[in-house]
Image (cartoon, rainbow, N blue to C red):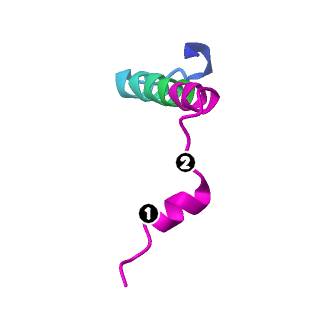
Amino acid sequence: MLRDLPEDADWGDVMYKIYVRQSIEQGLKDSQEGRVISHEEIKKRFQPAK
């Protein structure tokens, strides 16, 4: 993972890369365990009140 960073990367770049990877791994785990919400359900939840 660190090998993919440019030579001038700073600590913030490293932390961001770790954060993104952890977020992706958590999303994949949630999906595999069925903790998902359909696109249609999200649209319903965020639809403006009438």
In the image, taking residue 2 as reference, residue 10 lies left or right, namely left
Rendered-image quadrant of the N terminus: top right
Q: Position of residue 26 (x, y in %)?
A: 51, 26
- Measured Cα–Cα span from mark 2 to mark 1: 10 Å
Please tell me the numbered disc located at residue 37: 2
In the image, taking residue 41 as reference, residue 19 lies left or right, namely left
Q: Is residue 36 magenta?
A: yes
Give, as a single range, the part of the protein colored magenta. 26-50
Total marks drawn? Answer: 2
Please tell me the numbered disc located at residue 32: none
Residue under label 1, please give it.
45
Q: Which residue shows up at 44% across the image and 72% down it? A: 47
Q: Position of residue 19 (x, y in %)?
A: 43, 27
Q: Reply above or below: 5 against 45.
A: above
Q: Reply above or below: 41 against 16.
A: below
Q: Between disc 2 and disc 1, whose residue precedes?
A: 2
